[in-house]
Image: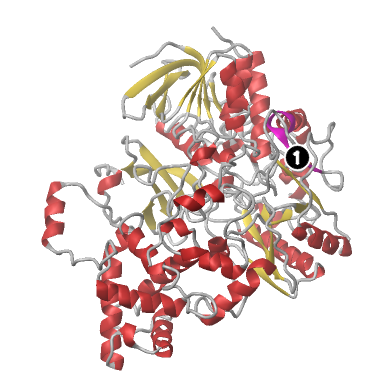
Amino acid sequence: MPLPKVDAVVIGAGAAGPIVAKELAFAGWRVVLLEKGRWHTSADCRKDDLRNQRNPTLGYPFGPEEEGNPRVFVDLNGRERIVKPSEPGYNNNAFCVGGGTLSYGAMAWRFHPNDFRMRSTYAAKVPRAFENSTLEDWPISYEDLEPFYEKAEWEIGVSGDLSGDPFKGPRRRALPMPPLPPTREHEILEKGARRLGLHPFSIPMLRNSVPYNGRPACMRCRWCVGFACEVDAKNGTQNTVIPAALATGNLELRTECSVREILLDEKGDAAGVAYFDREGRPWEQPARYVVVSCGAIESARLLLNSRSRLYPQGLGNRFDWVGRNLQGHTYTGANGLFEEIVYDDLGPGASIAICDFNHGNPGLAGGAMLANEFIRLPYQFVSGIRAPGVPRWGRAHKEFVRRAYRRIIPVLGPTQEIPVFDSRVTLDPRVRDRFGIPVARISGYRHPHSIEVSEYMAERAADWLRASGAVKVWLRRAGRGVSGGQHQAGTCRMGRDPKTSVVDPWCRVHDTANVYVVDASVHVTNGGFNPVLTIMAIAYRTGAHLARAGRRA
Amino acid sequence: MPGRAPILYDSVKPIKGGGCLKRRSFLAGSLAAASACRSKPAPAAGYRFLTQAEVATLGAWVDTLIPPDEDPGARGAGVVRYIDLQLTRWFRRHQSSYREALARIDRWARSRAGRGFAELPPDTREELLSLMEQGEADRDHFPDGGKGAFELVLAHAMQGFYGNPRHGGNRGYASWKMIGVPPVPVRGREHYEAARTFPEKS
């Protein structure tokens, strides 16, 4: 059933879509924002360590629903299985208003300038990173994004202190809020880092350290990453750009709407989208522009599901690049056991970082930021942390948990992955979701060099912990399976050449005049950092561009 | 795989290579078939799924994994109740695995030591579970050497012991007190949540 035509329909109310929607709504465009999940309030946030967005033992509170949203996962041995959201291999982020930004840890990193030019930086120095990889430069630079990083930092709200990071890219303006006071872990690790001649500083976070934007400061509870903030001190799109855009009267947000496909006209441009509402009723929303912001897995799936006579292999997929180069981060690091109690019960936990090893590592392409981890809730600790030689159960295990819970500091980092053409999202030929739409099928592997760099990073984390006084240190290594998850990226690569990319430097799908992909799908590489601030910066840049260059009714 | 009929999420059969979970099917035919092949035994008083004998066996099993010492063990902290409750909720798909595993370990204990698993002394129980962990349980009783059942119960025992009390385990915040994390923190809404946790039964 067709609805009145609007200037733009934005699909997905996660980190990116609402920012584009806000920029357009502020420019006077009539915008519809479609979100597959619900709009949760902090009242839905139960401090449940078995049911949160980081531990779905008893399901995900912020979507997707366990039934009716399967994917197919193909493991390293080629075995395929149908996976529900809470099962390994699904690579879930969140399906809700705010997307991952409702419940994330909220680290607010800008990528390093060299993260945008991995080929130029490493082609001569580290040729093995280019074997069987699609490692490439971005078509845009750090300088292109700098004003939009700043805009994200001030509009969404970032606290932290980057003055101690000599490796950061040039910036014109400091962060709007100071960091939260340091935790005990922070103080211990700061001394250790200085002992090694490293450069520790307070992690930038999309979290209020002081009242900001009409909302209060963080109350430092232990339920942060994986949870919605009950005092709304964590800044996501759900409590910033979405209310701002709604207040213009130009944005309509429709929740629990699942888009089936992008509808094309006879010229091959988008005419709108077809979607199902919560009752399963089909609707058509005509629009002058379509913005796809569903995350790297679902954005690729939607393009692939948008088939037509002109694009029988899916929209933007003439050269078979949609869904390719799926990447996330290879997280590695180390755990350090201390004699003294290091746990002070001050959230969010993560507090201190170093960027000494993001680039310039001997013989390696890229690296990672290293930081102490968010608070480990008891079951999370038990399921993830065990010193070598400690049995998995029985008296000795219980004794270990009792003694070690408050004496362990984990240091971890997101190693920048070397993209692989065969790590990808396709459509499963058989499995459909509750609406009968073909589902994402995830397959592939990590590039060997990603593993190599991640091993090096684990050793650096171990050095840092030893220098900080840990009496026992052990490494946390990564598997070789395809990466994605909450940092999923890469599946609709940005580039100038339509034969080797999906969108242009302004995020417009090459084949079309009016379809944009705006989320981490467009990342050529994913940096050695949590990607959300880069996603937001790209959304601000594309939103501003569309508002300026686009034609509305 | 062209030409094959599409499959919807709720009627999925294992695909090549296996390993996929059986989905519940709401088709009348399969319901009839399912009810024909089992009759449900009565749950123990105060439980939703496990029988009296199963409660005893599972209690001994989880208490071997997390034994009582100066702090409560798994059984004392309500882990059996956690598993029982979840077997009627999130873990429905594990119902038959539990029914089977608890019967198997008991039969194995009887054939090996002449007594049911729950009646064995702790070190014998430990010995049996160690064999299962290594996949070396008697194959007449556990076709996979016991590994699958061991891992299932271990994961659930840890969840029940260290997880949030609202799900039936970690009674009285036993494990959180044990590790020194205040069960009712100064910050957050735990003062409100405390009233809504799973009602404790003595």
Q: Quadrant of the N terminus of chain A?
A: top left
Place of residue A75 in the rendered image (x, y in percent of width and height, measured from the top left): 45, 58
**Residue placed furthest toward the bottom:** B113
Residue A160 belongs to magenta span: yes
What's drawn in magenta, residue-wise? A153-161
Quadrant of res A19 = top right
Is residue A271 located in the magenta-colored stretch of the structure? no
The spot of residue B199 in percent (x, y) is: 40, 57
Across and down, in percent, residue B131 comes to 40, 84
Q: Is residue A479 visible?
A: no
For image coordinates 39% across by 50% down, the residue present is A84
Q: Please name the amino acid that badge 1 sits on.
A: Ser
Quarter-of-image position of residue A246? top right
Kindly identify which chain the residue marked by label 1 belongs to.
A
User: Label 1, on which residue?
Assistant: A159
Q: Nearer the viewer, residue A389 or A120?
A: A389
Q: Position of residue A400 (x, y in %)?
A: 60, 76
Residue pictured at 60% horizontal, 56% vertical: A447
Using residue A165 as the reference point, say whether residue A460 is left or right of it: left
Residue located farthest toward the top when viewing the structure as drawn: A553
Please name the residue shown 16% across and 58% down the image.
Answer: B34
Q: Nearer the viewer, residue B193 or A388?
A: B193
As displayed, is residue A35 above or below residue A296? above
The scheme the figure's colours follow is: secondary structure
